[in-house]
Image (spheres, helix red, strand yellow):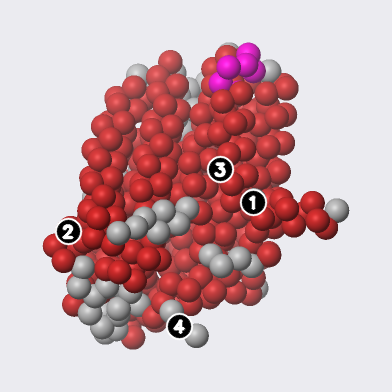
Amino acid sequence: MSAALDALLMHGHAILVLAPFATGAVLTVVRGGRAAMAVSAGVALALAGVATGLLIAGGSDPLGDGAAALIALIGAATFVAAGPVLSREVDARTQAIALGLAHMALGAAFSVVTTPDMATLVLSLLAAALLGSALTALGAARARAAAPAAFTAVLVSLCVGALGLFGASLMLGAAGGGDMAAIAAALAPSQGVDGLVGLVLLAVACAAFAGLAPMHGWAADMAAYTLHGAAGLVMIVVRLAAFVGFIRVWDIAVAEPQSALAEAFSLGGAALGAICVVAGSIQAIGAQDFRRLAAHALTAQFGCALIGLAAGGVDGAIAALFVVATGAMTALALVVGAAAARPQLGATAPMAALDGLSAQRPFIAAAVSVAAFGLTGAPLTAAFLGKWLSVEAALARGWYWAAAAVVAASFAAVFVAGQIIERMYFRERSAQIGPAPAGAAAFAPALLAAVAATLVFGWNGAGPLDVARLAARAMTGAP
């Protein structure tokens, strides 16, 4: 048994990539039904076990293993809930295609966070974004706006992917190899014009795929119009993988902390983070669709993480990784809560769907409330530690404006949380909206996982903090 487990973990990274693609290929050609739902959920749960095993085993890449475990847990929670919901919304054939596309997007995301090769990273990001676009296009039968949203996402993905591949080719030519560790050693500190241009293009490509401001509108549109059983996967997992790719590129740029290149990237990254915070927070406050609100809130969270990353040092890197992880789990709770609260008919998730939810679905309302408080970075939630570390790292660099941006994001989140709480607990449910879906229990595992992570790691964050510390030390080269 031990030998079989060791062999499984030895090839764990390959399994994480190949199994979802194989499952997706099978699901897209079957008729769907309960068997397809069972296979989909079973494979996702198995992948979560493999990814968690790799993380516990403690490999040489704590950043990739930690991101893979987080992606696998989000994927498992999503697929457990997706099947029952899709079976009520679309026909069996469309349901199977949606599940298949989502599995392949999951496999592409695993490839992004685990590959050591720069070109593979860019190609995997492109594949994940295009698969997400296809999922959005499936929603065109229920919402006309889904078609242009998918078309826009395809155009953005192809353009950004082309830039990223060109940048990767420039860096490969300058470094003489595709391994990212070798590239970092070969290009720093003076990589020449080709290497510098390639580095910038790669950073821009990863930032756009992650939906960082100002290239975040297409990601919000994808989240708003995709089939809602797969919305969490498209909006969270693909963007999370892209942000990890951005961190990989960032690690190359700041390989020598005292160089002019590292200083320029740090200042530019902090400024980009502040833009993400402002844009994401303002648009989250004004959002009229719950899934769009979650997408903009995730942009603001990424901005806070980017400020911590730009501030530098082990503490800044820990802050970035912790904020990214907690932001992803918070977004998962918001998206799944929107799906559970949404009426059975209708292509979107309007904020009005939350009205009076506490009287009909108190468990769902409580879970969404925890996620809303998590957005604010309130004490005893997991986001509190990450934002606190981000502020400390920014103040240590003398970037008071960056620290103020993180604090402002928390204040803006208070307005968002207040709006959510007011709708759920102080309004009556309109007859035009209808009752909450009868199958809302299908979302219980996803909500429970997201809420448990937000509260447990807020009370005692030793586990994820240790993983973040190991990844941060690997990134910064600190002992």
Mark 4 and mark 1: Cα distance apart in space: 28 Å
**N-term-proximal mark, 3 vs 4:** 3
Do tag 1 and tag 3 residues touch (Cβ < 8 Å)? no
Count of numbered labels shown in the rendering: 4
**N-term-proximal mark, 1 vs 3:** 1
Mark 4 and mark 2: Cα distance apart in space: 29 Å
Q: Which residues are magenta?
A: 27-32
Q: Identify the residue at horizontal 30%, vertical 69% (top origin).
A: 186
The 10 Å Cα crowd at callout 1, few under 14, some 14 to 19, many 20 or more, is some
Residue underneath mark 3: 17
Residue underneath mark 4: 478
| Left or right of 452 in this view: 165 | left
**N-term-proximal mark, 2 vs 3:** 3
Residue nearest the observer in this picture, 316 or 291: 316
**N-term-proximal mark, 4 vs 1:** 1
Residue underneath mark 1: 12
| Left or right of 77 in this view: 304 | left
* Mark 3 residue type: Val
Do tag 4 and tag 1 residues touch (Cβ < 8 Å)? no
Residue underneath mark 2: 194
Q: Is residue 418 magenta?
A: no
* Residue 452 sits above or below residue 342 on the image: below
Q: Quadrant of residue 174?
A: bottom left
Mark 2 and mark 1: Cα distance apart in space: 35 Å
Q: Identify the residue at horizontal 21%, vertical 68% (top origin).
A: 191
Mark 2 and mark 3: Cα distance apart in space: 31 Å
Query: Which label lies toward us, 4 or 1?
Result: 1
